[in-house]
Image (tube, helix red, strand yellow):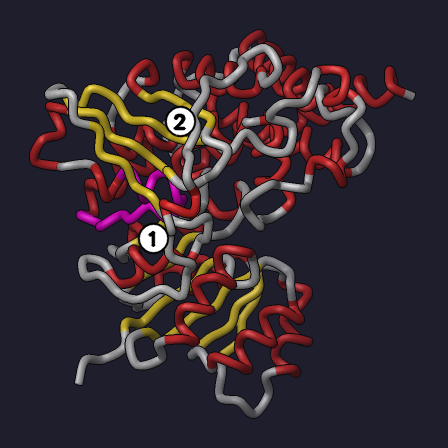
Amino acid sequence: MVEPRRLTILGATGSVGRSALDLVARDPDRFAAVTLVARSDLDGLVAAALRFRPERAVLADPALHRPLAEALAGTGIDTAAGPAAVLEAAAAPADMVIGAIVGAAGLAPTFAAVEAGRTVALATKECLVAAGRLFMDAVARRGVRLLPVDSEHNAIFQCFEAANAGAVEKIVVTASGGPFRTASLEAMRRATPAEALKHPNWSMGSRITIDSATMMNKGLEVIEAHHLFRLPGERIEVLVHPQSIVHGIVAYRDGSMIAGLGSPDMRTPLAHCLHWPERGPAPTARLDLAALGTLTFEKPDFERFPALRLAYAALEAGGGAPAVLNAADEIAVAGFLAGRIGFLDIARMVGATLEAAEARGLTADPGSLDDVLALDREARALAEAELRGLAANAS
């Protein structure tokens, strides 16, 4: 008998966490969720804990410890809450840590998992976007196995021949184009949050769905790919692929292109990570290429989707620019969802925040995680100021 693989899930109540738990539920002999961590979703965490019976359940919000403990009283599940408790949970013994906490809140816990030497299945973009050099240095120093969960990076990871890394000419990250792929600038100017949240292929959280609509998400993935695969931005291409079947491509100098295909379902890359280095089952729809008939590709429109251009520019600038980009985008997306600014204002606000940060000398390369977190706070303050200005002009 093989012991179940013990999993810690950071972000257990989010879309990635729920998909991971679905795989655990389908194969309880292979996987056991021993630690579940969420930010503030008390009801979601309690429900997951009662179903999966982990050893511990942790919330980031310290004010929720009492109701969490009361809800799980008598179950034998340890409970805790607060930032220190989250860090302790991230570093607790486990065969794999799934890092899926959205936003800057996921930085410190995922770093803690790496420093503890855990295998990490990474979905938290901020680790590579805001702290890519520091994070990859920590991964190398601790000898940690890092497995990318994002469908695009996971597909490239599967196609990337490590022994022939020097023969890679470029990698291609695909994008669906989102709900506004063919929309005019005028239609995008009038776009409502409800319209922007209607992703044609994927079911995701609100921020990543809006980022897909602006194509900022693809820009962030370019920055992630730069760190994961150690390639400069000019060798990381974005192609719009409306069907979301081809997730990533690796092109080699002999003219070969190896592509990773799959249905648009996060359980496919998650299953690859959870079973790695083996191959295990996933309950995802199998592709019928004959039924699909046609797969199409097109170059992205940097004029209608300037967020993608901003991400490439931040990657080229290096230092703290990607961290500023990410923080500003998070504030801008929240402002759009709250109805304070328009859809096209998101990229405009991110660009203005980057300019303000550079003018204030805030884009130097962070030397530590504390520096990254401090830069994130400063960038958010700048972004909030830009948001107030845009919202005032719009009213």
Residue located beneath label 2 in the image: 222
**Residue range highlighted in magenta:** 143-156
Whether residue 378 appears in this view of the structure is: no
Where, by quadrant of the figure, is residue 346 drawn?
Answer: top right
Crowding near the residue tagged with mark 2, few <14, some 14–19, many ≥20 C-alpha atoms within 10 Å: many
Q: Quadrant of the N terminus?
A: bottom left
Query: In this picture, is 187 found above or below 201?
Result: above
Label placed on residue 121 = 1
Name the spot of residue 31 as percent of width and height, x first: 33, 74
Where, by quadrant of the figure, is residue 223 drawn?
Answer: top left
Amino acid identity at mark 2? Val
Residue lying at 29% horizontally and 18% vertically, measured from the top left: 235
Taking the image as shown, residue 103 lies to the left or right of residue 64, namely left
**Nearer the viewer's eye, disc 2 or disc 1?**
2
Front-most of residues 372 and 343: 343
Q: Residue furthest top?
A: 359
Residue lying at 36% horizontally and 64% vertically, measured from the top left: 282
Q: Residue furthest left?
A: 163
Residue lying at 92% horizontally and 21% vertically, measured from the top left: 395
Mark 2 vs mark 1: which is more N-terminal?
Answer: 1
